[in-house]
Image: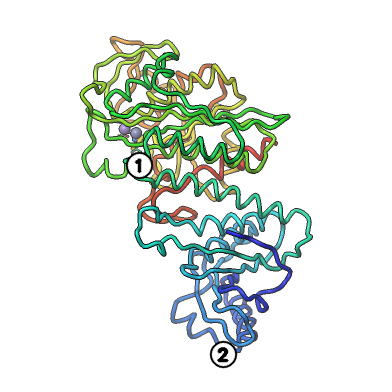
Amino acid sequence: MRISLSEGSWDKSTADIVAIAVASGKTKLGRTFGRIEAVTGRGSIKPLAADERFEGKRTQTLKVAAGGKAKARWLLLVGIGDEKNAEKIAWKMGHAVSSRARSLKSAAVELPEVSPESVRAASQGLVSGSYRYAEYKSDKAAGAALGSAVILGAPKGTRGLSTAVRAGKAIAESVNFARDLVNAPPNDLNPLTLARAATREAKKLGISCRVWNKARIEKEGMNLFLAVNKGSAIEPRMIHVVYKPTRPKKKVVFVGKGLTFDAGGLCIKPAGSMVDMKCDMAGSATTLGIVFAAARLKLPIEVHAVVGSTENMTGAKAYRPGDIYKSLEGKTVEVINTDAEGRLVLADVLTWAARKLKPDYMIDHATLTGACMVALGPYRAALYTDDDKLASAYLDAAGAEGESFWRMPLDGELRAMLKSPIADMKHVGGRYGGSITAALFLQEFTEETTWMHLDIAGPAFLDRAHRRMPKGGTGFGVATGVRFLEGLS
Ligand code: BES
Ligand code: MN
Ligand code: ZN
Protein backbone atom coordinates (compact mmCIF):
# COMPACT_ATOMS: atom_id res chain seq x y z
CA MET A 1 0.00 0.00 0.00
CA ARG A 2 1.21 3.47 -0.86
CA ILE A 3 0.79 5.84 2.09
CA SER A 4 1.32 9.57 1.65
CA LEU A 5 0.97 12.69 3.76
CA SER A 6 -1.12 15.72 2.88
CA GLU A 7 -1.77 19.09 4.43
CA GLY A 8 -5.40 19.23 3.34
CA SER A 9 -8.50 18.49 5.39
CA TRP A 10 -11.10 15.84 4.67
CA ASP A 11 -13.64 18.06 2.90
CA LYS A 12 -11.12 18.59 0.05
CA SER A 13 -10.01 14.96 -0.16
CA THR A 14 -10.73 13.09 -3.40
CA ALA A 15 -10.20 9.66 -1.86
CA ASP A 16 -12.90 7.02 -2.30
CA ILE A 17 -13.45 6.93 1.43
CA VAL A 18 -12.45 9.24 4.28
CA ALA A 19 -12.18 8.18 7.92
CA ILE A 20 -13.26 10.67 10.57
CA ALA A 21 -12.95 10.11 14.32
CA VAL A 22 -16.16 10.41 16.33
CA ALA A 23 -16.05 10.62 20.12
CA SER A 24 -19.05 9.44 22.12
CA GLY A 25 -21.21 11.72 24.26
CA LYS A 26 -24.10 13.87 23.10
CA THR A 27 -22.29 17.21 22.67
CA LYS A 28 -19.25 15.76 20.89
CA LEU A 29 -21.41 13.61 18.68
CA GLY A 30 -23.61 16.60 17.79
CA ARG A 31 -20.61 18.77 16.97
CA THR A 32 -19.06 16.17 14.62
CA PHE A 33 -22.38 15.55 12.90
CA GLY A 34 -22.87 19.29 12.44
CA ARG A 35 -19.47 19.63 10.80
CA ILE A 36 -20.18 16.76 8.41
CA GLU A 37 -23.63 18.07 7.55
CA ALA A 38 -22.22 21.51 6.77
CA VAL A 39 -19.77 20.08 4.24
CA THR A 40 -21.94 17.44 2.64
CA GLY A 41 -25.14 19.49 2.69
CA ARG A 42 -26.93 16.17 3.01
CA GLY A 43 -29.20 17.07 5.90
CA SER A 44 -29.12 15.56 9.34
CA ILE A 45 -27.16 12.33 9.92
CA LYS A 46 -28.92 11.87 13.22
CA PRO A 47 -31.80 9.65 12.05
CA LEU A 48 -29.39 7.31 10.21
CA ALA A 49 -27.03 7.19 13.20
CA ALA A 50 -29.94 6.50 15.53
CA ASP A 51 -31.26 3.76 13.27
CA GLU A 52 -27.83 2.11 13.09
CA ARG A 53 -27.35 2.62 16.85
CA PHE A 54 -24.14 4.55 16.11
CA GLU A 55 -23.12 6.53 19.19
CA GLY A 56 -19.39 6.91 18.60
CA LYS A 57 -18.57 3.98 20.87
CA ARG A 58 -15.20 2.27 20.49
CA THR A 59 -16.29 -0.71 18.44
CA GLN A 60 -18.72 1.17 16.18
CA THR A 61 -18.31 2.47 12.66
CA LEU A 62 -20.82 4.09 10.32
CA LYS A 63 -20.40 4.41 6.58
CA VAL A 64 -22.29 7.29 4.98
CA ALA A 65 -22.42 8.61 1.41
CA ALA A 66 -20.61 11.95 1.16
CA GLY A 67 -21.99 14.27 -1.56
CA GLY A 68 -22.46 18.02 -1.42
CA LYS A 69 -19.21 19.99 -1.34
CA ALA A 70 -17.27 16.91 -0.27
CA LYS A 71 -15.26 15.30 -3.06
CA ALA A 72 -14.93 11.87 -1.46
CA ARG A 73 -17.55 9.21 -2.22
CA TRP A 74 -17.89 7.84 1.28
CA LEU A 75 -17.28 8.90 4.83
CA LEU A 76 -16.42 6.35 7.49
CA LEU A 77 -17.28 7.56 10.95
CA VAL A 78 -15.03 5.72 13.36
CA GLY A 79 -16.22 5.58 16.95
CA ILE A 80 -13.46 6.23 19.46
CA GLY A 81 -15.57 6.43 22.63
CA ASP A 82 -13.69 8.34 25.29
CA GLU A 83 -10.27 7.14 24.11
CA LYS A 84 -7.68 9.89 24.68
CA ASN A 85 -4.54 8.11 23.48
CA ALA A 86 -3.72 9.62 20.06
CA GLU A 87 -1.74 6.55 18.99
CA LYS A 88 -4.58 4.16 19.80
CA ILE A 89 -7.07 6.36 17.94
CA ALA A 90 -4.80 6.61 14.91
CA TRP A 91 -4.23 2.85 14.71
CA LYS A 92 -7.92 2.23 14.95
CA MET A 93 -8.82 4.74 12.25
CA GLY A 94 -6.27 3.33 9.83
CA HIS A 95 -7.41 -0.19 10.55
CA ALA A 96 -11.13 0.61 10.33
CA VAL A 97 -10.89 2.28 6.93
CA SER A 98 -8.67 -0.34 5.28
CA SER A 99 -10.56 -3.31 6.68
CA ARG A 100 -13.88 -1.81 5.57
CA ALA A 101 -12.67 -0.60 2.15
CA ARG A 102 -13.55 -3.81 0.24
CA SER A 103 -13.47 -2.89 -3.45
CA LEU A 104 -12.49 0.75 -2.88
CA LYS A 105 -9.05 1.79 -4.08
CA SER A 106 -8.08 4.89 -2.10
CA ALA A 107 -8.66 6.14 1.42
CA ALA A 108 -7.86 9.17 3.55
CA VAL A 109 -7.60 9.42 7.30
CA GLU A 110 -8.09 12.59 9.30
CA LEU A 111 -6.30 12.13 12.61
CA PRO A 112 -7.49 14.24 15.55
CA GLU A 113 -3.82 14.73 16.44
CA VAL A 114 -0.83 14.56 14.10
CA SER A 115 2.54 13.49 15.51
CA PRO A 116 5.21 10.99 14.45
CA GLU A 117 3.68 8.47 16.88
CA SER A 118 0.13 8.85 15.62
CA VAL A 119 1.21 8.82 11.95
CA ARG A 120 3.19 5.65 12.56
CA ALA A 121 0.22 4.03 14.31
CA ALA A 122 -2.17 5.05 11.52
CA SER A 123 0.15 3.57 8.90
CA GLN A 124 0.49 0.39 10.91
CA GLY A 125 -3.29 0.15 11.25
CA LEU A 126 -3.82 0.80 7.54
CA VAL A 127 -1.50 -2.01 6.46
CA SER A 128 -2.73 -4.40 9.14
CA GLY A 129 -6.38 -3.77 8.28
CA SER A 130 -5.77 -4.41 4.58
CA TYR A 131 -4.63 -7.96 5.32
CA ARG A 132 -6.49 -10.67 3.38
CA TYR A 133 -5.48 -14.29 2.93
CA ALA A 134 -6.75 -15.22 -0.51
CA GLU A 135 -3.80 -17.30 -1.74
CA TYR A 136 -6.05 -20.31 -2.36
CA LYS A 137 -9.18 -18.52 -3.57
CA SER A 138 -9.82 -18.82 -7.28
CA ASP A 139 -11.73 -15.54 -7.20
CA LYS A 140 -8.87 -13.04 -7.20
CA ALA A 141 -11.18 -10.24 -6.05
CA ALA A 142 -11.20 -11.93 -2.64
CA GLY A 143 -7.70 -10.61 -2.05
CA ALA A 144 -8.41 -7.06 -3.16
CA ALA A 145 -7.02 -4.48 -0.77
CA LEU A 146 -6.74 -0.74 -0.58
CA GLY A 147 -4.10 0.52 -3.03
CA SER A 148 -3.30 3.89 -1.50
CA ALA A 149 -4.01 6.00 1.54
CA VAL A 150 -3.42 9.60 2.54
CA ILE A 151 -2.94 10.81 6.09
CA LEU A 152 -4.50 14.27 6.28
CA GLY A 153 -3.47 17.32 8.25
CA ALA A 154 0.17 16.33 7.94
CA PRO A 155 2.32 18.86 6.06
CA LYS A 156 4.83 16.92 3.97
CA GLY A 157 7.97 18.58 5.27
CA THR A 158 7.14 18.05 8.95
CA ARG A 159 10.04 16.41 10.70
CA GLY A 160 9.82 12.73 11.37
CA LEU A 161 6.49 12.09 9.66
CA SER A 162 7.79 10.31 6.54
CA THR A 163 10.03 8.14 8.70
CA ALA A 164 7.00 7.39 10.86
CA VAL A 165 5.03 6.23 7.81
CA ARG A 166 7.87 3.93 6.76
CA ALA A 167 8.19 2.49 10.29
CA GLY A 168 4.47 1.80 10.67
CA LYS A 169 4.40 0.12 7.27
CA ALA A 170 7.49 -1.97 7.97
CA ILE A 171 6.10 -3.31 11.24
CA ALA A 172 2.67 -4.13 9.84
CA GLU A 173 4.18 -5.75 6.75
CA SER A 174 6.20 -7.99 9.06
CA VAL A 175 3.05 -8.83 11.00
CA ASN A 176 1.32 -9.69 7.72
CA PHE A 177 4.30 -11.80 6.66
CA ALA A 178 3.87 -13.84 9.86
CA ARG A 179 0.10 -14.14 9.24
CA ASP A 180 0.71 -15.50 5.75
CA LEU A 181 3.02 -18.21 7.07
CA VAL A 182 0.53 -19.27 9.74
CA ASN A 183 -2.40 -19.32 7.32
CA ALA A 184 -0.55 -21.35 4.68
CA PRO A 185 -1.86 -24.94 4.52
CA PRO A 186 0.42 -27.61 6.00
CA ASN A 187 0.72 -29.58 2.77
CA ASP A 188 2.45 -26.56 1.22
CA LEU A 189 4.14 -25.07 4.26
CA ASN A 190 6.49 -27.70 5.70
CA PRO A 191 9.97 -27.36 7.27
CA LEU A 192 11.61 -27.19 3.83
CA THR A 193 9.32 -24.53 2.40
CA LEU A 194 9.35 -22.57 5.66
CA ALA A 195 13.14 -22.45 5.39
CA ARG A 196 12.82 -21.32 1.78
CA ALA A 197 10.39 -18.55 2.71
CA ALA A 198 12.81 -17.31 5.39
CA THR A 199 15.75 -17.48 3.00
CA ARG A 200 13.88 -15.55 0.33
CA GLU A 201 12.84 -12.76 2.71
CA ALA A 202 16.33 -12.52 4.23
CA LYS A 203 17.83 -12.20 0.77
CA LYS A 204 15.40 -9.41 -0.08
CA LEU A 205 16.53 -7.51 3.01
CA GLY A 206 20.20 -8.31 2.51
CA ILE A 207 20.61 -10.19 5.79
CA SER A 208 21.98 -13.63 6.60
CA CYS A 209 19.90 -16.83 6.76
CA ARG A 210 21.50 -20.19 7.45
CA VAL A 211 19.53 -23.41 7.16
CA TRP A 212 20.56 -26.72 8.74
CA ASN A 213 19.38 -30.02 7.31
CA LYS A 214 18.83 -33.24 9.23
CA ALA A 215 22.45 -34.42 8.93
CA ARG A 216 23.70 -31.14 10.38
CA ILE A 217 21.19 -31.27 13.25
CA GLU A 218 22.32 -34.86 13.94
CA LYS A 219 25.95 -33.82 13.94
CA GLU A 220 25.13 -31.18 16.55
CA GLY A 221 23.49 -33.77 18.81
CA MET A 222 20.01 -32.26 19.02
CA ASN A 223 18.38 -35.60 19.83
CA LEU A 224 15.20 -34.26 21.41
CA PHE A 225 14.46 -32.21 18.29
CA LEU A 226 15.26 -35.24 16.10
CA ALA A 227 13.03 -37.55 18.16
CA VAL A 228 9.99 -35.43 17.31
CA ASN A 229 10.86 -35.61 13.61
CA LYS A 230 11.10 -39.41 13.48
CA GLY A 231 7.44 -39.98 12.63
CA SER A 232 7.47 -37.52 9.72
CA ALA A 233 8.26 -38.25 6.08
CA ILE A 234 9.75 -34.75 5.78
CA GLU A 235 13.18 -33.73 7.09
CA PRO A 236 13.50 -31.18 9.90
CA ARG A 237 15.18 -27.83 9.46
CA MET A 238 16.84 -25.39 11.81
CA ILE A 239 16.63 -21.86 10.46
CA HIS A 240 18.89 -19.09 11.72
CA VAL A 241 18.36 -15.51 10.53
CA VAL A 242 20.72 -12.75 11.69
CA TYR A 243 20.33 -9.01 11.50
CA LYS A 244 23.52 -7.31 12.66
CA PRO A 245 23.91 -3.51 12.53
CA THR A 246 27.37 -1.92 12.64
CA ARG A 247 27.51 -0.96 16.34
CA PRO A 248 24.84 -3.02 18.11
CA LYS A 249 23.88 -1.88 21.61
CA LYS A 250 22.49 -5.28 22.64
CA LYS A 251 22.14 -8.80 21.30
CA VAL A 252 18.70 -10.42 21.45
CA VAL A 253 17.93 -13.95 20.28
CA PHE A 254 14.37 -14.96 19.49
CA VAL A 255 13.63 -18.69 19.35
CA GLY A 256 10.52 -20.05 17.67
CA LYS A 257 8.55 -23.28 17.73
CA GLY A 258 8.11 -24.29 14.10
CA LEU A 259 5.81 -27.32 14.06
CA THR A 260 4.33 -27.03 10.59
CA PHE A 261 1.79 -29.64 11.64
CA ASP A 262 1.13 -31.25 15.02
CA ALA A 263 -0.90 -34.44 14.72
CA GLY A 264 0.19 -35.34 18.26
CA GLY A 265 2.41 -38.22 17.13
CA LEU A 266 1.49 -41.66 18.47
CA CYS A 267 -0.46 -39.93 21.26
CA ILE A 268 -2.61 -38.74 18.41
CA LYS A 269 -4.96 -35.79 18.79
CA PRO A 270 -8.72 -36.18 18.30
CA ALA A 271 -9.92 -34.72 14.99
CA GLY A 272 -11.40 -31.62 16.53
CA SER A 273 -8.10 -30.65 18.19
CA MET A 274 -6.04 -31.42 15.10
CA VAL A 275 -7.93 -29.33 12.59
CA ASP A 276 -6.06 -26.05 13.21
CA MET A 277 -2.68 -27.58 13.97
CA LYS A 278 -1.05 -25.94 10.97
CA CYS A 279 -0.84 -23.00 13.39
CA ASP A 280 1.77 -24.79 15.48
CA MET A 281 4.55 -22.94 13.67
CA ALA A 282 3.18 -19.54 14.73
CA GLY A 283 6.06 -19.04 17.17
CA SER A 284 8.50 -19.36 14.29
CA ALA A 285 6.44 -16.95 12.17
CA THR A 286 6.49 -14.36 14.96
CA THR A 287 10.21 -14.85 15.48
CA LEU A 288 10.93 -14.35 11.79
CA GLY A 289 8.57 -11.38 11.62
CA ILE A 290 10.49 -9.66 14.42
CA VAL A 291 13.95 -10.12 12.90
CA PHE A 292 12.74 -8.94 9.48
CA ALA A 293 11.09 -5.87 11.02
CA ALA A 294 14.28 -5.07 12.93
CA ALA A 295 16.17 -5.18 9.63
CA ARG A 296 13.61 -3.01 7.84
CA LEU A 297 13.76 -0.45 10.65
CA LYS A 298 17.57 -0.68 10.88
CA LEU A 299 17.41 -0.90 14.67
CA PRO A 300 20.76 -0.58 16.49
CA ILE A 301 20.26 -4.02 18.09
CA GLU A 302 21.68 -7.33 16.91
CA VAL A 303 18.70 -9.62 16.44
CA HIS A 304 18.71 -13.37 15.78
CA ALA A 305 15.81 -15.65 14.95
CA VAL A 306 16.40 -19.35 15.51
CA VAL A 307 13.63 -21.71 14.48
CA GLY A 308 13.32 -25.44 15.05
CA SER A 309 10.99 -26.82 12.41
CA THR A 310 9.47 -30.28 11.92
CA GLU A 311 6.13 -32.04 11.75
CA ASN A 312 4.86 -34.25 14.59
CA MET A 313 3.42 -37.30 12.82
CA THR A 314 2.67 -40.98 13.34
CA GLY A 315 4.98 -42.67 10.80
CA ALA A 316 6.42 -46.15 11.41
CA LYS A 317 9.58 -44.65 12.90
CA ALA A 318 7.71 -42.29 15.23
CA TYR A 319 9.06 -41.74 18.74
CA ARG A 320 7.12 -43.41 21.53
CA PRO A 321 6.01 -42.79 25.08
CA GLY A 322 8.70 -44.44 27.20
CA ASP A 323 11.57 -43.58 24.85
CA ILE A 324 14.57 -41.88 26.44
CA TYR A 325 16.76 -39.41 24.54
CA LYS A 326 19.86 -37.46 25.48
CA SER A 327 19.43 -33.72 24.95
CA LEU A 328 22.05 -31.42 23.50
CA GLU A 329 22.39 -29.96 27.00
CA GLY A 330 23.36 -33.40 28.31
CA LYS A 331 20.33 -34.35 30.41
CA THR A 332 18.44 -37.52 29.48
CA VAL A 333 14.70 -37.09 28.99
CA GLU A 334 11.95 -39.69 29.28
CA VAL A 335 9.14 -39.18 26.79
CA ILE A 336 5.70 -39.34 28.40
CA ASN A 337 3.27 -37.96 25.84
CA THR A 338 4.37 -37.52 22.22
CA ASP A 339 1.92 -34.64 21.86
CA ALA A 340 4.12 -32.54 24.17
CA GLU A 341 6.61 -32.22 21.30
CA GLY A 342 7.16 -28.46 21.27
CA ARG A 343 9.19 -28.38 24.46
CA LEU A 344 11.50 -31.11 23.11
CA VAL A 345 12.26 -29.17 19.93
CA LEU A 346 12.69 -25.92 21.86
CA ALA A 347 14.90 -27.46 24.55
CA ASP A 348 17.66 -28.30 22.09
CA VAL A 349 17.32 -25.07 20.13
CA LEU A 350 17.44 -22.99 23.34
CA THR A 351 20.60 -24.78 24.48
CA TRP A 352 22.23 -24.27 21.11
CA ALA A 353 21.30 -20.57 20.97
CA ALA A 354 22.39 -19.92 24.57
CA ARG A 355 25.77 -21.59 24.09
CA LYS A 356 26.64 -20.43 20.60
CA LEU A 357 25.13 -16.96 20.50
CA LYS A 358 25.48 -15.84 24.15
CA PRO A 359 22.76 -13.18 23.89
CA ASP A 360 21.83 -10.48 26.41
CA TYR A 361 18.27 -11.77 26.17
CA MET A 362 16.83 -14.99 24.80
CA ILE A 363 13.08 -14.94 24.15
CA ASP A 364 11.03 -17.82 22.78
CA HIS A 365 7.58 -17.74 21.20
CA ALA A 366 5.65 -21.02 21.08
CA THR A 367 2.13 -22.36 20.71
CA LEU A 368 3.15 -24.63 23.53
CA THR A 369 0.17 -25.73 25.64
CA GLY A 370 -3.60 -26.01 25.58
CA ALA A 371 -3.32 -25.49 29.35
CA CYS A 372 -2.26 -21.91 28.68
CA MET A 373 -5.60 -21.26 26.97
CA VAL A 374 -7.43 -22.92 29.86
CA ALA A 375 -5.69 -20.48 32.19
CA LEU A 376 -5.87 -17.24 30.19
CA GLY A 377 -8.47 -17.67 27.47
CA PRO A 378 -7.85 -17.43 23.74
CA TYR A 379 -6.71 -13.80 23.45
CA ARG A 380 -3.87 -13.56 25.92
CA ALA A 381 -0.36 -15.03 25.94
CA ALA A 382 1.53 -16.24 29.01
CA LEU A 383 4.83 -14.59 29.88
CA TYR A 384 7.42 -16.41 31.97
CA THR A 385 10.75 -15.05 33.15
CA ASP A 386 12.72 -14.62 36.35
CA ASP A 387 13.89 -11.18 35.23
CA ASP A 388 11.49 -8.54 36.60
CA LYS A 389 12.89 -5.73 34.46
CA LEU A 390 12.55 -7.75 31.28
CA ALA A 391 8.98 -8.71 32.19
CA SER A 392 7.89 -5.14 32.85
CA ALA A 393 9.60 -3.77 29.73
CA TYR A 394 7.84 -6.42 27.67
CA LEU A 395 4.44 -5.83 29.26
CA ASP A 396 4.81 -2.08 28.61
CA ALA A 397 5.69 -2.73 24.96
CA ALA A 398 2.65 -5.00 24.65
CA GLY A 399 0.36 -2.37 26.15
CA ALA A 400 1.51 0.18 23.60
CA GLU A 401 0.83 -2.27 20.76
CA GLY A 402 -2.56 -3.42 22.02
CA GLU A 403 -1.43 -7.01 22.58
CA SER A 404 -2.22 -8.88 25.81
CA PHE A 405 0.23 -10.89 27.89
CA TRP A 406 -0.01 -12.04 31.48
CA ARG A 407 2.97 -12.80 33.66
CA MET A 408 2.83 -16.31 35.08
CA PRO A 409 5.04 -17.85 37.78
CA LEU A 410 8.05 -20.05 37.09
CA ASP A 411 6.95 -21.86 40.18
CA GLY A 412 9.90 -23.90 41.47
CA GLU A 413 7.60 -25.91 43.72
CA LEU A 414 6.23 -27.67 40.65
CA ARG A 415 9.65 -28.73 39.40
CA ALA A 416 9.28 -32.04 41.24
CA MET A 417 6.52 -32.97 38.78
CA LEU A 418 9.22 -33.38 36.10
CA LYS A 419 11.19 -36.04 38.03
CA SER A 420 11.60 -39.34 36.23
CA PRO A 421 12.32 -42.62 38.01
CA ILE A 422 14.47 -43.79 35.12
CA ALA A 423 15.99 -40.73 33.35
CA ASP A 424 17.24 -37.30 34.48
CA MET A 425 13.83 -35.78 33.75
CA LYS A 426 10.50 -36.52 32.19
CA HIS A 427 9.10 -33.98 29.80
CA VAL A 428 5.51 -33.70 31.05
CA GLY A 429 4.30 -32.92 34.56
CA GLY A 430 0.68 -33.64 35.44
CA ARG A 431 -2.64 -32.23 34.39
CA TYR A 432 -2.46 -29.27 36.78
CA GLY A 433 -0.27 -26.28 35.98
CA GLY A 434 0.43 -27.63 32.50
CA SER A 435 1.60 -24.32 31.06
CA ILE A 436 3.88 -23.72 34.07
CA THR A 437 5.53 -27.15 34.03
CA ALA A 438 6.15 -26.76 30.29
CA ALA A 439 7.95 -23.48 31.04
CA LEU A 440 9.90 -25.12 33.87
CA PHE A 441 10.99 -27.86 31.48
CA LEU A 442 12.30 -25.31 28.98
CA GLN A 443 14.14 -23.44 31.73
CA GLU A 444 16.35 -26.50 32.31
CA PHE A 445 17.85 -25.96 28.85
CA THR A 446 18.56 -22.24 28.89
CA GLU A 447 21.98 -22.43 30.60
CA GLU A 448 22.70 -19.15 32.41
CA THR A 449 21.05 -16.91 29.81
CA THR A 450 18.49 -14.24 30.74
CA TRP A 451 15.48 -15.91 29.20
CA MET A 452 11.77 -15.35 28.68
CA HIS A 453 9.17 -17.81 27.43
CA LEU A 454 5.98 -16.62 25.71
CA ASP A 455 3.23 -19.21 25.31
CA ILE A 456 1.12 -17.85 22.45
CA ALA A 457 -1.11 -20.94 21.99
CA GLY A 458 -4.25 -18.80 22.37
CA PRO A 459 -3.79 -15.58 20.39
CA ALA A 460 -1.60 -16.98 17.56
CA PHE A 461 -4.63 -18.31 15.70
CA LEU A 462 -8.26 -17.28 16.23
CA ASP A 463 -11.58 -18.53 14.98
CA ARG A 464 -12.93 -14.97 15.04
CA ALA A 465 -11.42 -11.50 14.78
CA HIS A 466 -10.72 -9.84 18.13
CA ARG A 467 -9.36 -6.35 18.93
CA ARG A 468 -6.29 -5.89 16.68
CA MET A 469 -6.27 -9.52 15.56
CA PRO A 470 -7.93 -10.96 12.46
CA LYS A 471 -9.48 -14.40 12.18
CA GLY A 472 -6.93 -17.13 11.43
CA GLY A 473 -3.22 -16.40 11.78
CA THR A 474 -2.77 -13.17 13.74
CA GLY A 475 0.95 -12.42 13.70
CA PHE A 476 0.58 -11.99 17.45
CA GLY A 477 3.79 -10.89 19.19
CA VAL A 478 5.58 -9.28 16.25
CA ALA A 479 4.57 -5.70 17.10
CA THR A 480 5.35 -6.14 20.80
CA GLY A 481 8.72 -7.72 20.07
CA VAL A 482 9.71 -4.86 17.79
CA ARG A 483 8.61 -2.22 20.29
CA PHE A 484 10.58 -3.97 23.01
CA LEU A 485 13.70 -3.87 20.80
CA GLU A 486 13.18 -0.17 20.12
CA GLY A 487 13.09 0.38 23.87
CA LEU A 488 16.56 -1.15 24.15
CA SER A 489 18.05 1.34 21.72
N1 BES B 1 0.62 -27.49 19.88
C1 BES B 1 0.02 -27.99 21.06
C2 BES B 1 -0.57 -26.89 21.94
C3 BES B 1 -1.72 -26.10 21.36
C4 BES B 1 -3.03 -26.46 21.64
C5 BES B 1 -1.49 -24.99 20.55
C6 BES B 1 -4.08 -25.73 21.10
C7 BES B 1 -2.54 -24.26 20.02
C8 BES B 1 -3.83 -24.62 20.29
C9 BES B 1 1.05 -28.74 21.89
O1 BES B 1 2.05 -29.37 21.16
C10 BES B 1 0.32 -29.80 22.63
O2 BES B 1 -0.24 -30.66 22.02
N2 BES B 1 0.35 -29.72 23.95
C11 BES B 1 -0.30 -30.67 24.79
C12 BES B 1 0.63 -31.01 25.92
C13 BES B 1 0.17 -32.16 26.78
C14 BES B 1 0.21 -33.45 26.00
C15 BES B 1 1.06 -32.24 27.99
C16 BES B 1 -1.59 -30.06 25.30
O3 BES B 1 -1.59 -28.87 25.61
O4 BES B 1 -2.59 -30.77 25.37
MN1 MN C 1 1.45 -31.32 20.51
ZN1 ZN D 1 2.47 -28.61 19.32
Tell me the residue at 37%/12% (across/down). Answer: 326
Camera-side mark, 2 or 1: 1
Q: In the depicted view, which residue is nearer to us: 176 or 475?
A: 176
The total number of labels drawn is 2
Q: Which residue is mark 2?
A: 43
Q: Quadrant of ligand 3?
A: top left
Q: What amino acid is at disc 1?
A: Asp
Q: Is residue 226 visible?
A: yes
Q: In the depicted view, which residue is nearer to us: 106 or 64?
A: 106
N-terminal-most mark, 2 or 1? 2
For residue 188, the mark is: 1
Indicate left or right for 60 with 3 as reference: left
Tell me the residue at 56%/57% (across/down). Answer: 125
Residue 228 pos. (x, y %): 32, 24
Indicate left or right for 431 with 466 as reference: left
Please tell me whether mark 2 sits on a helix, a strand or a loop. loop
Tell me the residue at 55%/39% (across/down). Answer: 290
Please tell me whether mark 1 sits on a helix, a strand or a loop. loop
* Above-or-below relation of 25 to 158: below
Q: What amino acid is at disc 2?
A: Gly
